[in-house]
Image (cartoon, rainbow, N blue to C red):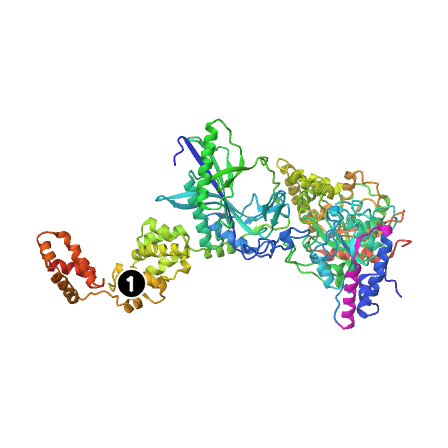
Amino acid sequence: MEDIYFTTITSLRDRIRRGDIKAREVIEKYLGRAQKLNQRLNAFISLNQEGALAQADKIDQMVASGKDPGPLAGVPMAIKDMLCTRGLKTTAASRILYNYVPPYSATVVERLEAAGAITLGKANQDEFAMGSSSENSFFGVVKNPWDENYVPGGSSGGTAAAVAAGMSVAGIGTDTGGSIRQPAHFCGVVGVKPTYGRVSRYGIIAFASSLDQAGPMTRTIKDSAEMMEVICGWDKMDATTAKVQVPKWSTQLSSNLKGIKIGLPKEYYSSAFAPDTQKVIDQALAVVREAGAQIVEVSIPLTEFGVPIYYLVAASEASSNLARYDGVRFGHRADFSKKPAEDLAEFYSRSRGEGFGTEVKRRIMLGTYALSSGYYDAYYRKACQVRRLLRDQFKKVFTECDALLTPVASTPAFKIGERIADPLQMYMNDIYTTSTNLVGIPGLSVPGGMSSEGLPIGVQITAAHFCEEKMLNVGFAIEQALGIWKKVPNGL
Amino acid sequence: MAYNDWEPVIGLEIHAQLLTASKMFSSDSAAFGGADNEFTHPVTLGLPGALPVVNEKAIDFSMRAGLALNCQIRNRSVFARKNYFYPDLPKGYQISQFDAPLCEKGFVEYFLNGEIKKVSIERAHMEEDAGKSTHFADYTLINLNRAGVPLLEIVSGPDMRSPAEAAEYARMVRRILRYLEVCDGNLEEGSMRCDCNVSVRRKGETKLGTKVELKNINSFRFVEKAIEYEIQRQIDAIESGEKIVQETRLWDTAKNRTFSMRSKEEAHDYRYFPDPDLLPIEVGFDWLEKIKKELPELPLAKARRFQDQFGLPAYDSFVLTQEKALAEYFEQTAKVCGNAKAASNWVMVELLRELNEQKLLVQDSPISSQRLGELILLIENKTISGKMAKDVFLEMLKNPKSAQEIVNEKGMSQITDEGAIVKIIQEVLDKNVSAVAEYRSGKNKLFGFFVGQVMKASRGQANPDLVNKILLEKLK
């Protein structure tokens, strides 16, 4: 039998739809493998043992009775624990939600399940998606399947690790400043952040509402396109979703890039990348040139402000979004039985003080400060103004080219513990990814090569608002020419 | 009320719950009541991942109110988050509007002691209501049914100078909102809430004094009483050398006084910022025009029209326009009987007295405007006298028949036949020969006695004008 572990969505769902293999068998095997490997990688916070099998049986019945089981029939998914799943614990990797079971599912989850996908389990991550290494989790550090001494990236590190390790066929991550693309790069998978407004945020635990966007993490570009067709589109429950038609991306992929102009923002290329990263970028450029694309230099002068603006905007929104975790209605509440709270303030500060981790507290404080009267104009308002200017610069750039090709991060995965003590160094890791979210354009990471240590290196492609198809084609061309995606980690 | 050399300065913040079927940002019912925590969609509960989506009806209603308050409607207004922690505020922030409210720069005119007064409206912005906390000795219960109900907060300028002005302004706002059918204005149930900002300063002073906010006022009478108390408290405090602290005080209905709610409250930083979950409200020309076209005639305009069109006194026209249903009732009555002045008297005196006694709304009046108009018509065409009409009116309260039918059944119609009246008069005079003699010898006072006897003999049906005329002739 063909290997069902390191397979693609398209291949697996075709086999299930044809009746070659039962969804139940697939899910049983995946649950077993995920459980086993989780002891090493800690990619999942929880597995959906019973629910996944029940969903699989439903798919098998549909196949047996000749009904359409959907485009993602029987495909196991690692759902980042930021997405609410009805009846299934959803924690945001935080102590403050360690026992929270939502009464409803995120629109993304609803749509995936309606398309036949199976929620295999809830993937580990940085707490409230705040982090770039998946080390900030109440449920422990996630390991990189290529080398367990390394981080898988973050914040969607659990999803990336699960897909890379063959613990799931695909998954959902969320990307606020690079949280899908960077772990995809670190783990050698495809990760796509669609245009802001493509994917409903309803039921996704909010980190920074104006930046958050869910997206697929898969082994191939085509798989990501398949998932995007399911999860994208207007949702009446999210006022910020766009009423824009969702193309059939998966059927329109082309590695012929004739007529496509690819821009290299000179500010991104002004400082040296790690030698292996440079090699991968050079190789990707050769591939796209070969595929017919024209390479042009472009300029986004405000690039250097991307990270500071990002951390002001994201922290400000987060400070407000996380106010609802107050120990009143759900989640962790401090034990007041021995020492009662003196007043309401103490009730809140003890519950929240115990419930949130260090990085989350740091950002709540940063955001509270930036929004405070007397500082608002200098920080939050200024950041919003520069954000608008940055958007204008990107708009101009996309009149000069169709897509941008850049690194995802300046290095491949770093070692666990290496940067955790230095938040600023950790934040600078996001230098190539945050502008995408600030501007709202789509971005992806596609595997482009391996480092000398055997760690994957991705290439980032971004495009103008709602122009995912150009971005996907460039990624597809690189993927098809290099075939890096076929590599799997040893010893798993 | 005079305050010697002190001048009170009063501004009101009126919170009006909008009568939408569902809440401002969710599909939950916005109805008053319901079982505890019955209307608690994930959005209302502020569950992780829940997002607000604005109820367009709430914007429609707010625009309607804004236009009626003579406000400018912004073509782009923004929802902002007001951040603070409280257990009945599920998200830890209230969605409100801050620097770009939907409505601003308006005014309201109202009528007090024979004159029209004007209060400026600084802004009217949309926001969601919080839940309700009920405090017990060592615990608090929270009901979130109210959380997320749409509110319009109407902020007046500091333009009022007496408790009566404040109360009358508030009544006018309530009246307008009820005319628009956007708020039922029930202070007791809290669908309308009046927070009063009160300060005092020495007459002639142009700077405002330190203001105190009064809350928990659930009737217009208490608006007046609470402000009155607060003005005196502040004057007494300043005169005895104390400083007024900026604070929120609650009105205690039982003790007739205000008391300080929280002292640590000063300088609350709400960290307002635009809500990234909601797009700005863009009001285009067509939308605005549509709402403008739907606006009904408002109370003050109606009162002025009643004065012009029907020649009613100002006071009458203001009484009749207090409620839209009453004004409509009056107009219909006037149309049926053709005499607006008579219609106004009947509605204001007889009808309102009965309705008040029976605690009925005019909509539920046992006598329809059509029936009342017909009754007045019977006086107009002299079928019955005004006095008889009052009896018919009382009968009509219990009897659904028309005035004419009741008159017919009871044989109550007026005797206008001169011959018949002459006959009755002659009988009365024949029976009272000595009184006739006395009258003729100069005792003019007896004329009333003869009228009374004639009316009695005719069982009240003789036309009083004819009786007077013929009696005078006969007694010559």
Q: Quadrant of residue B401?
A: bottom left
Q: Provide residue A178's location: percent of width, then percent of height.
A: 75, 48
Nearest to the observer: residue B103 or residue A24:
A24
Residue type, mark 1 in image: Leu
Provide residue A94's location: percent of width, then percent of height: 75, 47
Could you tell me which quadrant the C terminus of chain A lies in? bottom right
Q: Is residue B221 above or below residue B446?
A: above
In this rendering, the count of numbered labels is: 1
Residue at coordinates 27% horizontally, 63% vertically from top-left? B378
Of helix, strand and loop, which mostly describes the magenta segment?
helix
Question: Picture coordinates of residue B218 (x, y %)?
Answer: 49, 46
- To which residue does mark 1 refer? B377
| Element on which disc 1 rests | helix
User: In the image, is residue A468 part of the stretch drawn in magenta?
Assistant: no
- In the image, A367: left or right of B398? right
- For the N terminus of chain A, the image quarter is bottom right
Q: Is residue B357 visible?
A: yes
Looking at the rendering, the stretch of residues picked out in magenta corresponds to A39-66
